[in-house]
Amino acid sequence: MALLELRNLHVALEDGTEIVKGVDLAVNTDEIHAIMGPNGSGKSTLAYALMGHPGYQITDGQILLDGQDVTELGADERAQRGLFLAFQYPHAIPGVTVASFLRTAINAIRKARADGEDDPIPVPEFRKQLMGAMDELKVPRELAQRYINDGFSGGEKKRVEILQMAMLQPRIAVLDETDSGLDIDALKIVAAGVRKLAGPETGTVVITHYQRILNYVEPDYVHVFVNGGIVEEGGPELAHKLEAEGYEGFSPNGGGES
Ligand code: ADP
Ligand code: MG
């Protein structure tokens, strides 16, 4: 039994348009999966549906976490069970600082793990963890007291997404285009953060359009995603093939090279 399993997952927009057309995927701890596909193929839609975003309807199929069907659960419950999504376009939350956001999120997860009993993280411990993670990810310490993503640069937003991941220690981490808009130094820092978390406690899904981040985060499995479905699967060599040849040889019907 895989830690995370998608079975024949279909996802539609609120107007009923089907975007994700039957995806099967199994992810275990200690595995890094790359989902690679062109813009508009439905990668973010898949990520949102996985997290339980209410704007994306699962019309068929199932999401299983530890063998339990979570398809009907809300985003908060999925997060409490250890699912985490780093967004392609992180939203600002004016009025909520990075530090208070993280402390609230950590305490919600701790509470769920303590069977509903409050078990807040002691403030000194939280501060120590936060400052350690910020230093490691080279996030300026002053950002902790700023409103989350409010006026942050593109690179700061992405690093704060990885900071959240480092602090929440999810069991399944999904990174949606975390590489886009990063210069090479920021990309290396972000990739090091991802590599550090990926391991025996965590399964990782890196969603990307470009092969670039995969030079720094070597995937175990590559899934080529075109027009709402996985059309080819392989090892890291497949990412290099895509880099060289692009997505044009992959037809949505799994026809392979033309
Ligand atoms: P990708 O992440 O692979 O670039 P997306 O999942 O963002 O692809 O988008 C897939 C398709 O679904 C696109 O045609 C996009 O315009 C459409 N889409 C996604 N989310 C929405 C939404 N909230 N409202 C309207 N259209 C959407
Ligand atoms: Mg996207």
Image: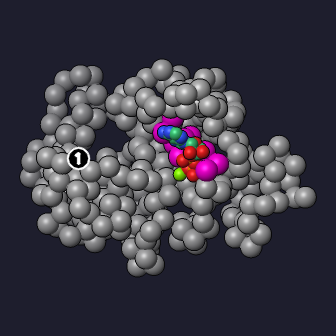
Q: Secondary structure at mark 1?
A: strand
Q: Is residue 120 visible?
A: yes
- Residue 147 part of the magenta-drawn span: no
Where is residue 206? Give x, y as percent.
54, 55
Say how many tags the image has. Answer: 1
Left-right relation of 184 to 5 = left
Q: Looking at numbered disc 1 in the image, what kind of residue is underneath it? A: Ile
Q: Quadrant of residue 191?
A: bottom left
Q: Is residue 221 visible?
A: no
Q: Measured along the vertical axis of the image, is residue 176 above or below residue 182?
A: above
Where is residue 226? Give x, y as percent.
71, 49
Q: Main secondary structure of the magenta part?
A: helix
Where is residue 35? Give x, y as percent.
62, 52
- What residue is at 68 percent from the left and 49 percent from the top? 225
Where is residue 208? Give x, y as percent.
57, 58
What's the coloring here? one colour
Residue that lies at the very extreme toward the right in this rendered image: 258
Mark 1 crowdedness (10 Å alpha carbons): few <14, some 14-19, many ≥20? few
Quarter of the N terminus within the rendering: top right
Q: Quadrant of ligand 1?
A: top right
Q: Measured along the vertical axis of the image, is residue 109 above or below residue 185?
A: above
- What segment carries the magenta color? 40-49
- Looking at this view, is 223 or 58 the one in front? 58
* Pointer 1 residue: 93
| Ligand 1 contact, mark 1 (Cβ < 8 Å) | no
